[in-house]
Amino acid sequence: MSLSDAVLYRHLTGRCTVGIYPLLTDASCGLLAVDFDEAQWREDARAIVFACKAMDVPVALEISRSGAGAHAWIFFEGTVAARDARHLGVALISEACARTGQLNLNSYDRLFPNQDTMP
């Protein structure tokens, strides 16, 4: 199935599921997503949003379909090296931890893309 406005509409209204893998074959990506699960996801997701605002990084927060987690989405104007996108993610997590006084974000699961290069 090719991606179209109709497919996106069906996805957003819950009638189909559309997924992506953000790592491109040249080790670049057009987005970064931070995944939160577990009990403390609300607080940790808020901490990432505040960290993004502090670092002037536009972010969109989405509650997972299950309602038991969230995704923070950062979209780039073009493609960037996946390594650089992931470094940004780590910097945002560090900033969120510093702002909350936590050693880590307990509900943080992973970054997407979750690797720097395509094997």
Image: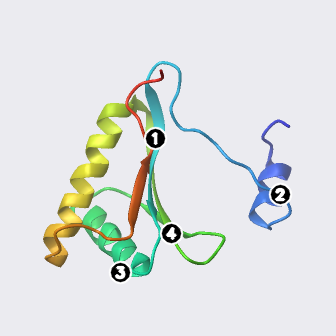
Query: Can you tell which mark lies on residue 16?
Result: 2
Judged from the image, the secondary structure of the residue bearing numbered disc 4 is strand
Q: With respect to residue 58, does 76 lie above or below?
A: above
Q: Nearer the viewer, residue 78 or 115?
A: 115
Q: Mark 1–mark 3 contact, CB under 8 Å? A: no
x, y percent for residue 46: 36, 76
Res 105 quadrant in image: bottom left
Q: CA distance from mark 2 to mark 3?
A: 29 Å
Query: Secondary structure beneath disc 1?
Result: loop
The answer for how far apart the CA atoms under marks 1 and 3 are is: 23 Å
Q: Are marks 2 and 1 in contact (CB under 8 Å)?
A: no
Say which amino acid is labelled 4.
Answer: Ala
Of the two numbered discs 2 and 3 on the same chain, state the one appearing first in sequence: 2
Whichever of labels 2 and 1 marks the residue nearer the N terminus, that label is 2
Sequence order check, earlier mark of 4 and 1: 4
Which residue corresponds to the image point at 26% horizontal and 42% vertical from the top-left? 87
Q: In the rendered image of this protein, does residue 25 appear above or below residue 23?
A: above
Identity of the amino acid at label 2?
Answer: Cys
The residue that mark 4 highlights is 70
* Alpha carbon separation for disc pair 4 and 2: 19 Å
Which amino acid is tagged 3? Glu
Is residue 19 toward the left or the right of residue 29 in the image? Answer: right
Residue 57 pos. (x, y %): 32, 56
Number of residues whose C-alpha sits closer than 10 Å to that of mark 4, classed few (under 14), some (14–19) or many (20 or more): many
Q: Earlier in the sequence, mark 3 or mark 4?
A: 3
Tell me where residue 48 sits by quadrant. Answer: bottom left
Where does the image place residue 84, in percent across and percent down from the top left?
30, 35
Residue on which the image places disc 1: 113
Secondary structure under tag 3 reads helix
